[in-house]
Amino acid sequence: MTSVPTTREIFFAFFRITMFAFGGAIAWVHRGFVVERKWLSEHEFAETLSLCQFLPGPNITNFAVVVGMRFRGVPGAVAALVGLVVPPTFILIAIGMLYERIASVAAVRGALNGLAASAAGLFIVLLVNLLRTLVRNRPAVSIPVAATSFALVLSGLLSVPFALLTLGPISIAAAWFRRR
Amino acid sequence: MHIGHDFWLALGVLFTHVSFLALISFGGVNTVLPALHHLAVNEQHWMTDRDFASLFALASVSPGPNFMVLTLIGYKAAGVTGAVLATLALCVPTSLLAFAVVKVWDRFKTAHWRLAIQEGVVPVTVGFVAAAAVLLVRASDNSIAAYAITAAVAIVGTLTRFSPLWIFAISAVVGALGFV
């Protein structure tokens, strides 16, 4: 059985996730909402996630809106979104202020260089996971498409919106005919 | 900051570009990272390539979802107002869209065209993430030590189940001592 949380519980659930989730908030949502609190069944979680992945924008903000709505309507969606975004906004503004002041200090500059190198590495991990999924699903089409969009955008030949506008329809058409 | 024409122009550019990019960010904000990098570094000169890498790293290790690098970009562009505006421009339009789509989702979640769109768009956006990875490595790694850190995180993250978080901590210390 799943239970329906209150608006307050929704707010604090997303607050907790946003403050403590490192590297992929969705995994924490799964643990918090499905495993621990039983607010969503596995099936509901998977279904909601596929909607959030279909929509543009961050998966996690879409998730907040969709489950907030499902539980408590518009107030639930607002509580979820505010709990997720507002607290870290304050923290990041403070970090931005601090950055302006102390980024020129040699030791801070060095620490940031080290962190930036690590963050680039973590981004590569994310990319490798995406590529693994592509290789598992129809690589004959998806890998050349991904390689083309990579080359177009990195070389500056096309901006992201134009690359999406030109390659997107071709790739969607290929998927359309393959699925028929 | 001197509040004048430039300030309002920065706010206008931030809001229009960020909300537009958010609405085409299928698969999350990482997919439009090359466009954000281009906007902030090459086009508007809000920051250097180095700043971009540092702010991305700070957003990765701070509380809050990683897409909140946009809050820091907004801060660099137009102070606290810019930080708040960039965060809103990212979250509000996409949330309204999610709000609208969730009501009709059940009608087309298994529709042929919807599945074709999702299947077709993913490889295009993976190409964008790959371009973003190259841009981040270029911006972050200016020494052998930095490349070594990036490679270490990438290898640990893809091949083992260890959290690469401890490499972040070590890399910050090594950097602060002046080795990166």
Image (cartoon, coloured by chain):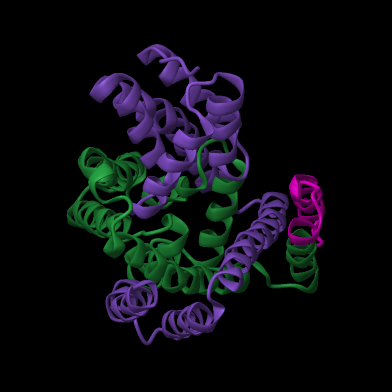
Chain colours: A purple, B green
Q: Nearer the viewer, residue A87 or B72?
A: A87
A177 up-or-down from B48: above or below: below
Q: Residue at x 51, y 37 (%)?
A: B64
Q: Is residue A137 at all visible to an observer of this figure?
A: yes
Is residue B176 in the magenta section? Answer: yes
Residue at far front of view = A180
Point out residue A85 in the picture as x, y percentages from the top left corner. 41, 33
Q: Residue at x 74, y 49 (%)?
A: B168
Q: Is residue B17 left or right of residue B65?
A: left
A54 up-or-down from B99: above or below: below
Q: Residue at x 59, y 39 (%)?
A: A27
Q: Could you say which quadrant of the image residue A90 lies in? A: top left
- Name the quarter where the C terminus of chain B is drawn: bottom right
Is residue B54 in the magenta section? Answer: no
Q: Which residues are magenta?
A: B156-180
Q: Main secondary structure of the magenta part?
A: helix
Q: Is residue A48 left or right of residue B63?
A: left
Q: Nearer the viewer, residue A75 or B69?
A: A75
Point out residue A41 in the picture as x, y percentages from the top left corner. 50, 29
B165 up-or-down from B141: above or below: above
Point out residue B37 in the picture as x, y percentages from the top left corner. 43, 66
Q: Nearer the viewer, residue B143 or B132?
A: B132
Q: Is residue B101 at all visible to an observer of this figure?
A: no
B111 up-or-down from A150: above or below: above
Point out residue B33 in the picture as x, y percentages from the top left corner. 44, 63
**Number of callouts:** 0
Q: Residue at x 34, y 67 (%)?
A: B116
